């Protein structure tokens, strides 16, 4: 069968021309930028996408060929950091969770797997509402604020570092072993789903002229009553799974999370406690 795309491999250029998203797109609204992404393809495989490959060869190769990092120079048609691990874990999913690496407000959003996140987006390879609910809760926000790096000015936000903000966070259940039929799991998932639905409806708006200025930073700054109530419903569900009172302050939250983290890292056996 003859190729109908003009490419020798018969494949469409849409395989390697993708929308790209950065942290600013998450918190300030999409800029609708696109990128040429050959992923982990070899040079020969990439060259089979003729129209995208030629401008990369013309404009990227002269710069990358001089790069001191031999791998960057040798694989000049690929991104400097291809992140094959990230690509592998989100492959086959319909969506995944993303958050801006640096932001004033810590928000988590659903991203389509058609989108390529850049290095200013922290990616979580999960597609369930429960997991987004845990990340978006007050408990996780308090932990992340304490473990992240504050920027010079508060308005500039803080840096979310996965190794300190996420990997050390004591989840209710070990990731991958959550009891999906547990009423507490279901409550968190439902509250998270409702929060995202209401948030997305606000972002869409009813006035096309106002829609351009609607973004998550503005929404969090204004913090309308409906958003406060949606966050409270989610927090109540998350506090319930830990068995804690939702009215406790942030210092006590951090104290309890640190204690839980320490216990899980070094649990005291009954024999040692005697």
Image (cartoon, rainbow, N blue to C red):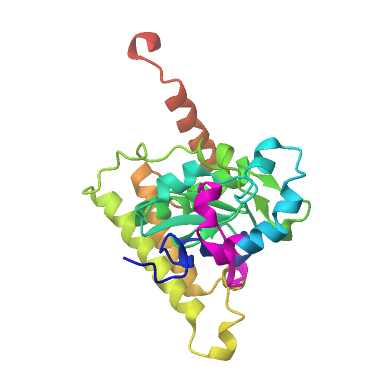
Residue 38 visible somewhere in the drawing? no
Q: Nearer the viewer, residue 172 or 34?
A: 34
Residue 257 visible somewhere in the drawing? yes
Q: In this view, does 196 lie to the left or right of 50?
A: left
Give coordinates of residue 45: x percent, y percent: 49, 51
Q: Which of 139 and 4 is in front in this view?
A: 4
Report which quarter residue 243 is drawn in: top left
Residue at point 40%, 44% (across, down): 244
Give coordinates of residue 245: x percent, y percent: 41, 48
Looking at the image, which residue sits at the far left?
A: 181
Q: Which of 239 and 141 is in front in this view?
A: 141
Residue at point 45%, 32% (across, down): 260
Task: Give the total number of marks visible in the rendering.
Answer: 0
Give coordinates of residue 253: x percent, y percent: 51, 43
Q: Is residue 28 left or right of residue 132?
A: right
Q: Which of 10 and 201 is in front in this view?
A: 10
Which quarter of the image is occupied by the C terminus?
Answer: top left
Residue at point 72%, 48% (across, down): 64
Which quarter of the image is occupied by the N terminus?
Answer: bottom left
Give coordinates of residue 117: x percent, y percent: 55, 56
**Numbered range of the magenta stretch:** 26-53
Residue 196 drawn in magenta? no
Residue 47 drawn in magenta? yes
Q: In this view, does 81 lie to the left or right of 40?
A: right
Looking at the image, which residue sits at the far front?
A: 2
Report which quarter residue 114 is drawn in: bottom left
205 is higher (above) or lower (below) than 77? below
Report which quarter residue 220 is drawn in: bottom right
């Amino acid at each position: 069968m003859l190729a109908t795309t003009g490419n020798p491999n018969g494949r469409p250029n849409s395989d390697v021309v993708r929308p790209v998203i950065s942290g600013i797109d998450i918190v300030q609204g999409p800029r609708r930028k696109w990128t040429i992404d050959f992923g982990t393809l070899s040079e020969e495989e990439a060259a089979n996408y003729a129209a995208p490959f030629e401008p990369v060869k013309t404009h990227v190769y002269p710069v990358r060929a001089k790069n001191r990092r031999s791998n960057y120079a040798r694989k000049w048609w690929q991104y400097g950091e291809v992140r094959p691990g990230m690509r592998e874990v989100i492959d086959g999913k319909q969506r995944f969770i993303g958050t801006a690496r640096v932001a004033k407000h810590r928000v988590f959003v659903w991203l389509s797997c058609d989108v390529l996140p850049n290095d200013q987006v922290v990616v979580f390879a999960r597609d369930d509402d429960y997991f987004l609910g845990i990340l978006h809760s007050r408990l996780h926000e308090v932990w992340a604020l304490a473990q992240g790096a504050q920027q010079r000015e508060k308005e500039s936000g803080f840096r979310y570092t996965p190794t300190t903000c996420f990997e050390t966070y004591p989840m209710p259940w070990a990731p991958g072993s959550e009891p999906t039929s547990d009423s507490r799991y279901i409550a968190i998932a439902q509250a998270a789903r409702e929060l995202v639905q209401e948030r997305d409806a606000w972002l869409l708006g009813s006035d096309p002229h106002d829609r351009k200025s609607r973004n998550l930073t503005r929404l969090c700054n204004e913090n309308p009553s409906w958003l406060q109530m949606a966050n409270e419903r989610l927090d109540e569900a998350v506090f319930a799974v830990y068995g804690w009172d939702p009215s406790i302050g942030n210092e006590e939250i951090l104290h309890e999370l640190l204690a839980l983290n320490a216990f899980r890292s070094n649990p005291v056996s009954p024999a040692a406690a005697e």
